[in-house]
């Protein structure tokens, strides 16, 4: 009986150590943003375009982005993720990317709140690049999986 109890306790200890040593499953979600003037609300005639790859690490709650743009009327004065908003609707700033001259190729990261992550996953975020000629936004695109 003592031997059985000793084996059970040892087994539980080994199981606990093994479970503790197993890392949490990390899920990294991938998104894409295609920017253009016709996606602005209201649409504009800008010839500018852009493309951004976005990932979200669900364990670290880390949003990362890497993108580029071209053909804008001038320098990017500010860049933001906006939300929550469905495609074709406007919303407030959810997360700032840059205030000032954003280079044509850029990247960054930020930690999201649970509410921001939920809106992102539901497709309720968009990205907007603003210029002096288009202070409300020159090119825009919805963040989609």
Image: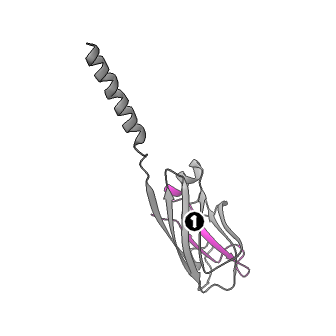
Residue bearing the label numbered 1 = 126
Q: Residue at x 34, y 23 (%)?
A: 9
- Circle 1 packing at 10 Å, graded few (<14), some (14-19), many (20+), is many
x and y, in percent, of residue 105 in the image: 58, 79
* Viewer-proximal residue among 8 and 127: 8
143 left or right, relative to 73: left
Q: Please report the bounds of the magenta region as a residue range.
A: 120-145
Answer with the quarter of the image where residue 79 lies. Answer: bottom right
Whether residue 28 is visible to the viewer of this picture, yes or no, is yes
Q: Quadrant of residue 10?
A: top left
Front-most of residues 40 and 26: 26
Rendering coords of residue 130 (x, y %): 68, 75
In the picture as drawn, the residue positioned furthest to the top comes out as: 1
**Looking at the figure, which quarter contains the N terminus?**
top left
Q: Is residue 135 above or below residue 122?
A: below
Image quadrant where one finds the C terminus: bottom left
């Amino acid at each position: 009986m003592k031997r059985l109890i000793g084996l059970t306790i040892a087994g539980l200890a080994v199981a606990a150590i093994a479970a503790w040593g197993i890392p949490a499953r990390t899920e990294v979600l991938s998104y894409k943003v295609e920017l253009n003037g016709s996606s602005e609300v209201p649409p504009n005639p800008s010839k500018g375009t852009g493309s951004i790859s976005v990932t979200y690490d669900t364990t670290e709650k880390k949003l990362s982005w890497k993108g580029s743009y071209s053909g804008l009327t001038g320098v990017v004065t500010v860049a933001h993720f906006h939300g929550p908003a469905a495609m074709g609707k406007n919303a407030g700033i959810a997360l700032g990317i840059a205030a000032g001259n954003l280079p044509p190729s850029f990247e960054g990261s930020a930690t999201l709140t649970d509410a921001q992550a939920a809106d992102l996953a539901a497709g309720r975020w968009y990205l907007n690049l603003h210029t002096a000629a288009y202070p409300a936004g020159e090119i825009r695109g919805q963040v989609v999986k």
